[in-house]
């Protein structure tokens, strides 16, 4: 049995925790801090690890310690396959859109300059694959856990679907401050779309796949384009 038994108490603790976690991630653990001491490959891996700990590992630990029913709590907040048929359908529909968006973004000069986050990851194929796997597991998964999970599902019955969609989109878009304008506007639209998919399926696992596919595909297009003789 957890330290507290009511789900609302768990949510309160998590919201207070995330207020501190967000502050730390954009200050003490910001990737620019790591770039002052290390190369970009090591710096972003360190940043990803911090992101994973602050936005997934520690919150899950809090849920286990505080909630009387941690598995049920996590499931109700999207850590489940939910309505799998709808999830698979939305995933299949979203794959072409994610790939097209990634291809278009990879041809934008500003996006090319910003991505991949680690330019050293392009030094060889093994390094690139390792970096992208870390990107998926340590960054995209915690991202969806927070924005399309813990900060989204509890708001739906409290304030309604559209306000909940808008609020999680606002917060996730603000986290893109400093990124290319194209990405900021894309995150605005994607926030509503991915939020709706999470709501329709009862799960953020499908949105994690779609989000990661778009981001990693963008890096892959950039990587392939740098190869001699590439016409992508």
Image: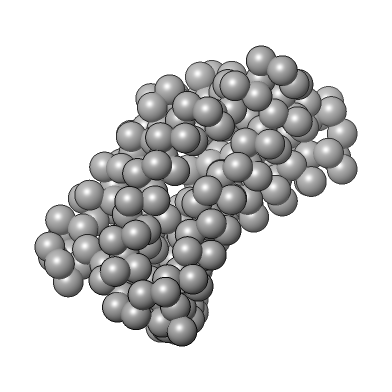
In percent of width and height, residue 4 lies at: 36, 75
- Residue closest to the eye, 230 or 29: 29
Question: 150 or 172, which lies in front?
Answer: 150
Q: How many labels does the image show?
A: 0
Residue 76 at what x, y percent from top left? 37, 77
- In this picture, is 24 found above or below 190? above
Residue 11 position by quadrant? bottom left
Instruction: Decide which of 209, 57 is in the foreground and name it.
Output: 57
- State left or right for residue 169 relative to residue 85: left
Residue 67 seen in this snapshot: yes
Tell me what residue is drawn at x 34 percent, y 38 percent.
Answer: 173
In this picture, residue 112 sits left or right of residue 223: left
Pinpoint residue 51: horizontal percent, then vertical percent: 56, 44
Q: Residue at x 49, y 35 (%)?
A: 25
State how the image is colored: one colour
Is residue 90 placed above or below 194 in the rendered structure? below
- Quadrant for the C terminus, please: top right
Relative placement, left or right, of 177 versus 121 is: left
In the rendered image of this protein, does residue 124 appear above or below residue 202? above
- Horizontal and vertical percent position of residue 137: 64, 55
Looking at this rendering, what residue extends furthest in the front direction?
A: 3
Residue that appears at 22% across and 49% down = 167
User: In the image, is 84 to the left or to the right of 37?
Assistant: left
């Amino acid at each position: 049995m957890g330290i507290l038994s009511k789900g609302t108490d768990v949510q309160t603790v998590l919201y207070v925790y995330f207020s501190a976690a967000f502050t730390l991630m954009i200050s003490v653990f910001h990737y620019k801090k790591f770039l002052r001491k290390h190369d970009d490959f090591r710096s972003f891996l360190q940043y990803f690890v911090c992101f994973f700990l602050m936005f997934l590992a520690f919150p899950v630990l809090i849920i286990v310690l505080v909630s009387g029913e941690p598995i049920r709590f996590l499931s109700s907040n999207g850590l489940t396959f939910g309505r799998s048929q709808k999830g698979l359908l939305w995933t299949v529909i979203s794959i072409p859109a994610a790939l097209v968006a990634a291809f278009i973004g990879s041809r934008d000069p500003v996006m090319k300059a910003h991505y991949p986050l680690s330019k050293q990851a392009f030094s060889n194929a093994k390094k690139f694959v390792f970096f992208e796997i870390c990107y998926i597991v340590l960054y995209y998964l915690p991202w969806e856990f927070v924005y399309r999970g813990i900060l989204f599902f509890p708001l739906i019955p409290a304030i309604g679907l559209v306000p909940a969609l808008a609020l999680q989109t606002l917060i996730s878009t603000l986290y893109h401050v400093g990124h290319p304008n194209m990405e900021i506007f894309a995150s605005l639209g994607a926030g509503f779309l991915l939020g709706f998919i999470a709501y329709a399926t009862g799960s953020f696992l499908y949105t994690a796949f779609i989000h990661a596919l778009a981001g990693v595909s963008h890096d892959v297009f950039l990587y392939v384009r740098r190869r001699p003789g590439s016409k992508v």
